[in-house]
Image (tube, grey):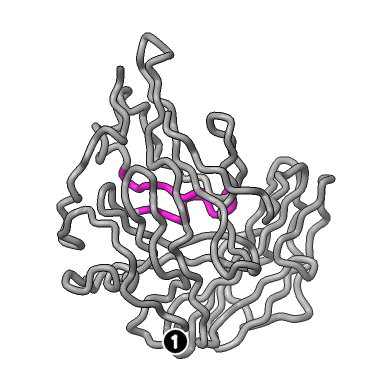
């Protein structure tokens, strides 16, 4: 029988960032508002996502320092969640495996452990060449039970649903020996969305909405508009922009995208980056356009936890 990740206890990675043992601990205090203090990270999440097998993923420098007041760090890291679009970005920290890239696939809503192969036997067959990808945005079925997408719920004032990182081991001669490896279920109920009193933002719209979808392809080139407050030095980042580059701080009349959204390029992420006038942090506006079928996400889907194999 091959090993599973749950059967292996791995000591914390030896890097100068954090030197401590794997301790699952609630943050000692809560932050209600994010300010424009340049000494604070520009993320908007506080706390940790708790993985089933690998311990917590901390969402920011502040999250780590609140959990470990006697072992604080000055290394800056943070994760951003956009309530308008449901998109994730940034970087979290896990003591067992290391950095978690929430910008790995923004459109597909996937995060990834940056060095899963190095942490686990160099990604050998014994570990199923573990890719370390956490699915955040799709409903999945595992052993007959549902893993629902992670999303912020205005009804609960917190995150609902679960992420999932589960891959079958590979390389064995007997398929019955294959077992699930990975972080397992990733629970975001200990993650807080930080309400900001820092008036630095960019809201990006496609045909006047942030998430543009049609069940029929193509979508004619959408009209791109954006509003902002407290930012300057705006630049396009990605998307079907005409003459990418410098942009006004806001554009309420809009400009037309350079192409259609069709069945070969869907989904298309549009993003613009500005600089906070007080904080000096990068401030992003994002919108997404897609066509064709897509999974229906309902907030009232019951959350059913993954059973042990």
User: Where residue 68 appears, x then y in whole percent?
Assistant: 23, 69
Q: What stretch of residues is rendered in magenta?
A: 100-115
| Residue at (29% x, 57% y) in the render | 24
- Classify 111 as above or below 244: above
| Residue at (62% x, 43% y) in the render | 139
- Classify 4 as above or below 26: above
Dot 1 lies on which element? loop
| Residue at (20% x, 62% y) in the render | 17
The residue indicated by pointer 1 is: 35
Q: Can residue 276 be seen in this view?
A: yes
The answer to which quarter of the image holds residue 71 is: bottom left
The answer to which quarter of the image holds residue 64 is: bottom left
> Could you tell whether 148 is left or right of 92 in the image?
right
User: Could you say which is closer to the camera, residue 58 or residue 106?
Assistant: 58
Q: Can residue 244 be seen in this view?
A: no
| Residue at (44% x, 32% y) in the render | 167
105 magenta-colored: yes
Residue sticking out furthest to the top = 173
User: Where residue 287 appears, x then y in whole percent?
Assistant: 66, 64
- Classify 143 as above or below 300: above
User: Could you say which is closer to the camera, residue 132 or residue 154?
Assistant: 154
Quadrant assignment for the C terminus: top left
- Classify 257 as above or below 14: below
- Which secondary structure dominates the residues rendered in magenta? strand
Quadrant assignment for the N terminus: top left
> Could you tell whether 294 is left or right of 154 in the image?
right
The answer to which quarter of the image holds residue 241 is: bottom right
User: Where residue 151 appears, x then y in whole percent?
Assistant: 59, 58
User: Could you say which is closer to the camera, residue 183 or residue 24?
Assistant: 24
101 magenta-colored: yes
> Could you tell whether 40 is left or right of 211 in the image?
left
> Could you tell whether 204 is left or right of 232 in the image?
right
């Amino acid at each position: 029988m091959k090993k599973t990740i749950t059967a292996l206890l791995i000591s914390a990675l030896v890097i100068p960032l954090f030197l401590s043992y794997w301790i699952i601990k609630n943050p000692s205090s809560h932050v209600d508002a994010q300010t424009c203090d340049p000494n604070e990270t520009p993320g908007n999440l506080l706390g940790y996502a708790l993985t089933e097998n690998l311990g917590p993923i901390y969402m920011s420098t502040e999250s780590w320092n609140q959990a470990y007041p006697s072992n604080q760090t000055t290394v800056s890291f943070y994760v951003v969640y956009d309530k308008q679009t449901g998109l994730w970005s940034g970087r979290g920290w896990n003591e067992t495996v290391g950095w978690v890239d929430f910008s790995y696939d923004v459109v597909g809503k996937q995060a990834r452990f940056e060095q899963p192969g190095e942490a686990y036997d160099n990604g050998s067959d014994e570990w199923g060449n573990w890719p370390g990808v956490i699915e955040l945005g799709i409903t999945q079925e595992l052993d007959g039970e549902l893993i629902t997408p992670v999303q912020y719920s205005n009804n609960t004032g917190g995150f609902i649903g679960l992420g999932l990182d589960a891959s079958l081991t590979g390389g064995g001669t007997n398929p019955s020996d294959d077992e699930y490896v990975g972080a397992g279920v990733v629970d975001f109920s200990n993650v807080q969305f930080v309400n900001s009193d820092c008036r630095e933002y960019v809201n990006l719209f496609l045909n006047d909405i942030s998430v543009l979808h049609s069940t029929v392809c193509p979508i004619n080139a959408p009209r791109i508009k954006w509003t902002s407050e407290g930012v300057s030095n705006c630049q396009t980042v990605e998307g079907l922009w005409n003459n990418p580059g410098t942009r006004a701080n806001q554009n309420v009349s809009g400009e037309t995208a350079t192409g259609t959204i069709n069945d070969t390029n869907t989904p298309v992420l549009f993003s613009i980056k500005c600089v906070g006038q007080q904080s000096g942090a990068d401030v992003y506006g994002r919108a997404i356009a897609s066509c064709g079928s897509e999974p229906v996400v309902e907030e009232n889907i019951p959350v059913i936890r993954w059973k042990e194999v």
